[in-house]
Amino acid sequence: MNFPEILSLFKQGKGTVKSHMKNLIEMAAADGSFMDVEYDLLKSIASQNGISESQLKEIRKNPGNVKFEVPNDPADRFKQLYDLVQMMSIDNEVHPEEAKLCNLFAIRFGYQRTNIKELIEVIRANIKNGQNASETMKRVSLLVA
């Protein structure tokens, strides 16, 4: 692999992470409010993905500058969906707009429409029971295949 290919992969990864942060911000705001618990989760996920709080604020301020990207890796794609479901559920209340948006993201990530509702319900149950994304992905492997 030559340097331009490596650079391209690096840029794609960072772009995908920024896209994910933008998606999480959209999910947090979908119910018309952006609660502290949602912002705390957003900061935590951003930190795990190498995004600083200042970068997060820039994405929130200028979401149009961030292009929607779907991760190439199925595990990364699932982790992003898991994070979105977690954001949707963090305040213990799922607003209809949040549910619609979560379904839309799942479709855009390539999950089968016929399985999305069940997939999201299983992810929510696993989050509630304290399972992380990796454990949850193992449990839903038949739904995402």
Image (cartoon, grey):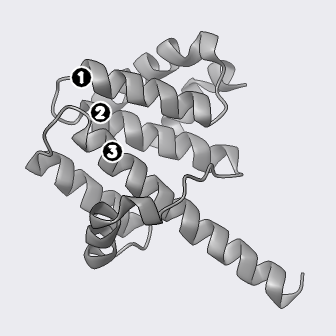
Residue topped by disc 1: 94
**What secondary structure is found at the residue carrying circle 3?**
helix
- Above or below residue 7? Residue 100 is above
Whether the residues at callouts 2 and 1 have beta carbons within 8 Å, the answer is: yes
Q: Looking at the image, can residue 116 be seen?
A: yes
Q: Which quarter of the picture shows residue 11?
A: bottom right
Earlier along the polypeptide chain: callout 2 or callout 3?
A: 3
Distance from label 1 to label 3 (Cα)?
A: 14 Å
* Side (left or right) of 145 relative to 84: right
- Please identify, in this view, whether the residue under mark 2 or under mark 3 is nearer the observer: 3
**What secondary structure is found at the residue carrying circle 1?**
loop
Identity, as a three-letter code, of the amino acid under mark 1: Val
Dot 1: few (<14), some (14–19), or many (≥20) neighbours within 10 Å?
some
Whether the residues at callouts 2 and 3 have beta carbons within 8 Å, the answer is: no
Image mark for residue 88: 2
Q: Which quarter of the picture shows residue 74?
A: top right
Q: Which quarter of the picture shows residue 93?
A: top left
Earlier along the polypeptide chain: callout 1 or callout 3?
A: 3
Q: Quadrant of the C terminus?
A: top right
* Side (left or right) of 142 relative to 45: right
Dot 3: few (<14), some (14–19), or many (≥20) neighbours within 10 Å?
some
Residue 132, percent from left and from top: 42, 41
Q: Going 61% across and 67% down the picture, which residue do you hit? A: 13
